[in-house]
Amino acid sequence: MDEFFDVVIVGTGAAGLYCALNLPERMTVLILTKQKADESDSFLAQGGICMLRGEEDYALYMEDTLRAGHYENDRGAVDLMIRSSNSVIRDLVRRGVRFARHGDGSLDFTREGAHSRPRILYHEDVTGREITQTLLEEVLRRDNLLLRENTAMLDFISDDAVCGGVVAAGPDGVPYTVGAGAVVLACGGIGGLYRNSTNFPHITGDALAMAMRHKVAVEHLDYIQIHPTTLYSKKPGRRFLISESARGEGALLYDKNGQRFTDELQPRDLLSQAIYRQMERDGTDFVWEDLRPLGRETLKVHFPNICHHCQDEGFDVLHEPIPVVPAQHYFMGGIKVDLSSRTAMPGLYACGEISCNGVHGRNRLASNSLLESLVFAQRAADDILFGETPAFGGKAPDLAPYREQEPLFAAYRQEVRNAIERMRKSHE
Ligand code: SIN
């Protein structure tokens, strides 16, 4: 083994960073990310993060989540997420996250599709960036957390019974092995595999493929969320989101004749289908979204990022509707995990979009993703520390068994090197 850490975390989105920050400072943690640390989909999240607004909101919040998910959700997971939302939000505020507030200092809540009432906290239209940047800055200040950018996980190391680390490669492409008592996969979804997606192109579900190769259980691989409203563009690359909270605040959708054709606040999957049907009827590649009902003040204060981006693309949202089209946005399936984010392989955890704990069912409710990532990242950290079968009982890990497996890891290294060599040759 080339290196040893107590824990390896793959991914620098909200889940990976929050898991790292919830581990004690006596633990050594290596955090890997395939590109730059701020190039995760969490940074792109616009709308916000849900919070339970008192006991009287519990049944409604539960029902909204279940209805959006077609009642295929794991109710225990939803309950855990909702019940944990207040403490997670309090912790974010303590760490310095700035949510929008009224003049008297109380929190301002916005609304999105399929929510029966406003329960979403936001920071302008860049809530993901506000949360993830705050967590990233704290990670960079912590001595026990080593962050390595431009470093891809090529495989995780296992004898198909337990996970003992990862094989990684930095910019030079030379693979090396990292032993660890626990490995946390927090590397996002699969949007990079789609031509039209709101995700970064490098988020390609690598960990999912590795899990399948190691026969670690995965599920609901066909549960893909299509976001109803992204800015129509003929340019290649990532699609720009027109946040659902814009519709929550009053934006309307029009067909080619400028007529409304559907309920703008139905769950995402149903609205995407309605838009596709309308495009087919009209013979168009997009429908129109009108943000003018929000008014100049709300657009400037709540949605400055959307206003600027549309301006750069030649649309003035204060004076005209903009063309929008559905695009891939989120993956509800993934590596199967329990409520402590444990995969089927001891020592291997998954949280965030690559994991499937059943919280979202068949279709995720808007603004449940950041909350779910944070809650279940914390659960992973708790289990690494306090779990009944902790990877190393909360003490410094005994790495002797992994060292004994050195010949196995050497074989992995060789296998990966051979694969890279074959790939290089096929590109020559
Ligand atoms: C949005 O702002 O529409 C996306 C937020 C989310 O995916 O929940």
Image: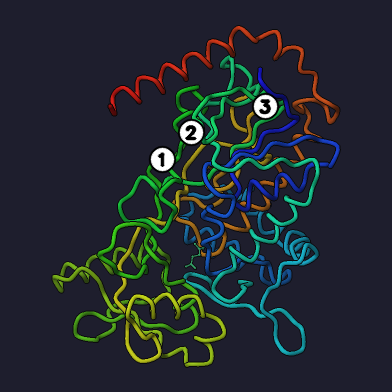
Residue in the picture at 58% in, 47% down: 352
Q: Residue at 75% of width from left, 55% of height from top?
A: 138
The amino acid type of the residue labelled 1 equals Leu
Q: Are discs 2 and 1 less than 8 Å apart at CB?
A: yes
Q: Position of residue 373 (x, y in %)?
A: 62, 51
Residue 221 numbered mark, or none: 1
Q: Is residue 350 above or below residue 248?
A: above
Residue at (75, 82) in percent of width and height: 106
Quarter of the figure that contains the N terminus: top right
Residue 268: which numbered mark, if any? none
* Closer to the camera in the image, 216 or 159: 159
Counting from the top left corner in percent of width and height, residue 88 is at 73, 59
- Residue 155, image x, y percentages: 52, 26
Left of 241 or right of it: where is 372?
right
Q: Quadrant of residue 267?
A: bottom left
Whole-angstrom CA distance, mark 2 to mark 1, is: 8 Å
In terms of secondary structure, where does tag 2 sit? strand
Depth check: give the residue in front, 415 or 327.
415
- Give the crowd class for mark 2: few <14, some 14-19, many >=20 residues within 10 Å: many
Mark 3 is on which residue type?
Gly
Q: CA distance from mark 2 to mark 3?
A: 16 Å
Mark 1 Cβ inside 8 Å of ligand 1: no
Q: Residues within 10 Å of mark 3 (few under 14, many from 20)?
A: many
Q: Which numbered tag is attached to residue 347?
A: 3
Q: Nearer the viewer, residue 279 or 41?
A: 41
Q: Are marks 3 and 1 in contact (CB under 8 Å)?
A: no
Q: Which residue is mark 2?
A: 218
Q: Is residue 129 left or right of residue 225?
A: right
Residue at 50%, 22% in the rendered image: 214
